[in-house]
Image: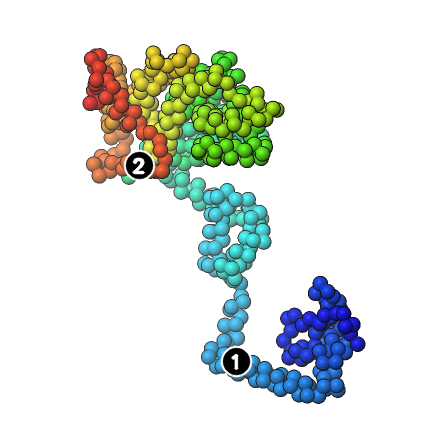
Amino acid sequence: MADSSCTIVPKKKVVSPVWDYFGLRADSEGKIIDDGVAVCRQCNGNVRASGGNTSNLLSHLRTHHPSKYTLVLQAQREKAKELSTASSSSTNASQATLPELFTKTQKYERTTRRWREITDSITYCISKDMLPIYTVEKEGFRRLTYTLDSKYEIPSAKYFSSVAIPALYEKTRETVAVEVQSSYYFSSTTDMWTSSTMEPYLSYTVHFITNDWTLQSRCLQTLFVPKDHNADNLSEVLTETLAQWKLEVGRQVFITTDNGSNILCATTVRLMWTQLSCFGHNLHLAVVNSIKDESRVQRCLGLCRKLVSAFSHSWKKKRDLTKAQNDLGVPQHSLVTDCPTRWGSLIKMIDRILEQEACIRQVLVVDRKNAHFIPTWQDLEVLESMKVALGQLDDFTDMLSGEQKVTVSSIKPVLHVLKSKVLKVCEGDTNLTNSLKQRVLDYLLNKYDDNDVDELLNVCTYLDPRFKGVYIENEVDLALVKDRLAREGTEMIEDQEGVSEPTSSSQSSSTVSDPSIKKRKLSSWLKETVELQSSSSTPQTPDQKIK
């Protein structure tokens, strides 16, 4: 007999009606004591039921409880009848043939169109989004593909790495080669960079205009460069890149690089290419060089970095900062640190600390350990001066760092705006502000103080319908630009026999900017400069010519 202190609970996941009269013993917490012994609910007798076997249970009812046994038999017959009726109606409605049943479970052959479509899509996804190839081996990804199409059997990672991805590369390479080789002229960009595993690479990108006047950019190579990065080796790599893509050096208008002495020597001395330094890189170096010798600035920036680090590595300070922001009604923004290779992040760090200064003070004033991080009035004065001097320069980084529009023709107008407005020394500014402005401006002007570079910028500016010859102040230079363009235009017409001149319908459409990005455009700066110059009685300037 069963122990009266035990509880009888029903057995889970059973289908036989005999279990309506039996259960399993459980302790006071509801845990099954022995699932191989059933307990009769009529007489509390123990009956062996190993593995869910119901033969002993039916025998017990037939011997000791005949009336219950009859009810169980009746319930079994009714259930069997229901299953038989449902199966018959389902079979009569649509009875699948043997070939149909076989087809439902048969996997796609690798030669079928459907298998190739799915495999190509997975290959494109891995390549486009730069996913690890091992993604195709993961259980979640395999379950996803099975859910989308159960007849598709995904190949191994080795197949994608050795067959699918190389095939996609060759196909894409052929398409890009046709696009690039069909363009008459192109410019290029190259840069050395280091991966997270400290491996050096060189990337080479070309920029060209298609026959329908669409600006395109294609990264042709990203090469591992294990050799020393001297001028000879870099010039050899660049030459081999052009040869592999069957591009003529004479069709390359110029190449944009940073200011590294090795790449400058490789392009201008070894290869004799026309080189133009990157405006964004020049602006970064101008800002960095303007502040590196200012001891006050360096001390203040060091304090800011330590301050940001203190809040970034303490959840208590983050919590207290949020509370202080709520108390003082300050926006709930986190502090940000600067990146050595992104000068714009320096301004963002200064902006955020000035915005959160009151909250920072409220948090640190009660913290003896970190109270010395509270900015003094001298520190705040330095930060304000830096913000006034450098705060507006971030707009120009975005203006001249895009790939969707030609930016080289805007360099001269931008330099003019910087000189006449943004970086102009003002009497109301602090000495530090004016000093930083002058240093940045001098550095930028020096970087473009070269006859070949000046001639290139003059040609590009003149071809831009927004500027024409406005920013070419020397009449002799303007005449040289017109003669050069006339000569090159004649040569192009002679070389391209049978190619009709572009009509007005071939003009490129303007790029629509993202309304969510609150960045100033070059036109707004030029407009302000025009209004400023027109209100004065000074001699005529380029902006007055525009008006």
Q: Residue at x 70, y 77 (%)?
A: 22
**CB under 8 Å between discs 2 and 1:** no
Indicate whether 387 appears above or below 243.
above
Answer few, some or many: residues within 10 Å of disc 2's Cα (few below 14, many 20 plus, some between 14 and 19).
few
Q: Which residue is mark 2?
A: 511
Residue 522 x/y as whole percent = 31, 27
Q: Residue at x 46, y 79 (%)?
A: 93
Label 2 to label 1: alpha-carbon separation: 65 Å
Binning the other alpha carbons within 10 Å of mark 1 as few (below 14), some (14 to 19) or many (20 upward) gives few
Asked if one can make out residue 311 in the rendered structure from this viewpoint, the answer is yes
Question: 119 above or below 467?
Answer: below
Helix, strand or loop for disc 1? helix
Three-letter amino acid code at the position of disc 2: Thr
Give the quarter of the image for residue 432.
top left
* Residue indicated by mark 1: 86
Please name the residue shown 28% across and 27% down the image: 524
Q: Which of the two discs, 2 and 1, labels the residue nearer the N terminus?
A: 1
Q: Locate the C terminus and report the quarter of the image it occupies.
A: top left
Inspect the image, locate mark 1, and give the three-letter code of the amino acid beneath it: Ala
Instruction: Please identify the quarter of the rendering in which residue 30 is found.
Output: bottom right
